[in-house]
Image: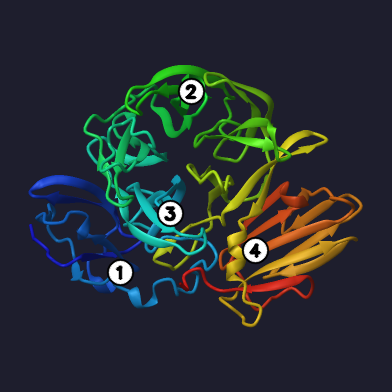
Amino acid sequence: MNSFHKRYWNLPIQNSAPLRRVTLLVDGKPEVVNQISLAAAPEQADWWAFLDTHVWPGKNLTFAEENVWIEESDEIWGSETLYKESLRSQVHFSSRRGWLNDPNGLVFYDNNYHLFYQHNPYGWSWGNMHWGHATSPDLVHWTEHGDALAPDSLGAMFSGSAVVDWENTTGFGANGKPPLVLIYTASGEQATQCLAYSNDGYKFTKFSGNPVLPEITPGNRDPKVFWHVPTRKWVMVLYVETSGKRHTIHFFSSPDLKAWDLMSVTEGGIDSDKFLFECPDFFELDLDSNEKNKKWVLTAANSNYSIGSFDGTVFTPEFSDISDVQGEGFYAAQTFSDIPQKDGRRIQIGWIRADSPGMPFNQLMSIPSVLTLKSTPEGPRLARTPVKELESLRDVSATGSGCFELHVEITESTEFEVSGVRISYDYKNQELMVRDYKITVPLISGKQNLMVFVDRTVLEIYASDGLVYITLPHLSQGESLPERGQLYPLRSLWDI
C-alpha cells in the first residue's frame, strides 16, 4: 500500500488488458472502487488516465491494491497534446480522457451552462460510471472540471438531472444563495434515486439521507426533475421497467426533493426500441411561438416523443410515438433547466455514439440545438436549430480546424459530396439520401435548405427548417470539401 502526494495520479491503460479491481482509500477507508484495464508496465499503455487528488483536499489517499503502476505529476500526462489529438472533435464537446455517454444535469447556474455526463475516467469503453462535469459561458467553449460524482456504496452513478433550488426547499442553500442540486440513479444492489448538492456549482456533497426514493423495480432509473410553477411542487419523471419488460414513466411529486409521492403512470410498450425507453425528458413549449397555446413534450432516449397536456399530476398524450431524428448515433438527449426567462430557449444536447479509435477518449456530445414546436399537416412536431452562439466559430478567412458548416439551398434534384459522404436530394419525391439512409425530407415553400456540420468523427444535418435532424458517425475526410453552397470553416471550440 503506497501513499501519493502530487495532484495527478496518471495510470497506464491498456485497452485489451483484463479488468482489475482498484480501490481508493481516503484516510484509510474505501471511497471508490473501479474496474480498470491497467497496463502491467508503462511501455504497454495505450493511453494514460488520471485521478485528480484535489477532489479530497487534506486527505490521506492510498490504493488498497499492490502493483498499481502510478506516475505522479502536477500535470496530466499528455497534456501538451490535449484537445489537439487527430480525432478530437473540434465543434462538439468530448471529455479529456476516457469514455463519455449520456448528458446529465444540464442546467444554467451562476452565469454558466453546466454539462454533466456519464463518464468512465479509466476506460475507453463503458464502465465505472461517474458524473463528468464541464461548464461554458456561451454553449460553445467548454472548460472541464473534475468528476462531480463518483461511485459509492450505493452503486455506480447513473443518469439524472439538475435543478437550481431557488426557494431553498431542501435547506441545502447557504449565505442566501440557492443550491445546485443533482438528482441521479445510484445503480448498485438496488437502483435508487439520490441527491447531491453544491453551493458553488463545483464541489458536491451527497445527501446524508440518500436514497430519497427506494427501488421500485430493478429497471428504474434516469430521474428528470423540475419545479412545476402552477402547483408549486417538484415533479420527477422516472423511467420504470415493470414486469414483462413493459416500459413506463412514473410521475412523482415532492415539496423538498427529499420525500416523494407517486402521482401517476404513463404506460409504454414492451419493445425497447419503442417510445418511453429510458432517459426521459419532460418540458413545455409554445406551439408556433404562441404563448397562449402551450404543449408538454415527453421524450425518450431514442428521441421518440409524445405531445400532450399535463395538469400537474397526469400527462395526457395527444400525439404519440413521434420520431424526428434520423441516421444513427444520437441518443439520451436532455434539455437545460433554469435558463433565464429573458432567454427562454429550450436547449438540447444528446450523446452521439461515434467512436474515436486509437484516442485516449471516446464518444462526444451533439452540438446544442434550440427546440421549438411547429404545426404541420400531421400535427405539432419538434423542430431543431443549432444555437446561434455557434456562429462565433465561423472563420471565413482561414481553413480553421478542418471542420466546417455548410448551407445548401436546393430547388431541384441534386447530388454532392461532403467529407467523403455522398448526399443527394430527390426533389420530386422529397427524399434525401445520406450514405445508405433514404429519408423523407419535405420541401418548405418549394425549396430545401440543408445545414451540415462536419467534425472529425460525425456529420450533423438540419433539414426542412429543423423538422428533420440527421446524425451520422463518420471519420472525416477533410480534403473532400463540397463544391456548392455557403461554406464556413470553423475554428476549434477549444481555442479560448
Tag 1: amino acid:
Ala
Image quarter of the N terminus: bottom left
* Quadrant of the rendered image containing residue 268: top right
Of pointers 3 and 2, the one earlier in the residue sequence:
3
Q: Which residue is mark 1?
A: 45
Labels 1 and 3 touching (C-beta < 8 A): no
Say which element carries label 2.
strand
Say which element carries label 3.
loop
What colour-coding does the image apply?
rainbow
Q: Is residue 455 left or right of residue 47?
A: right
Tag 4: amino acid:
Phe
Question: Residue 104, percent across and down?
Answer: 44, 45
Q: Which residue is mark 3?
A: 111
- Confirm whether residue 246 shows in the render: no
Mark 3 or mark 2, whichever is nearer to me: 3
Rounded to the nearest angstrom, the CA distance separating label 3 from label 2 is 32 Å
Tag 3: amino acid:
Asn
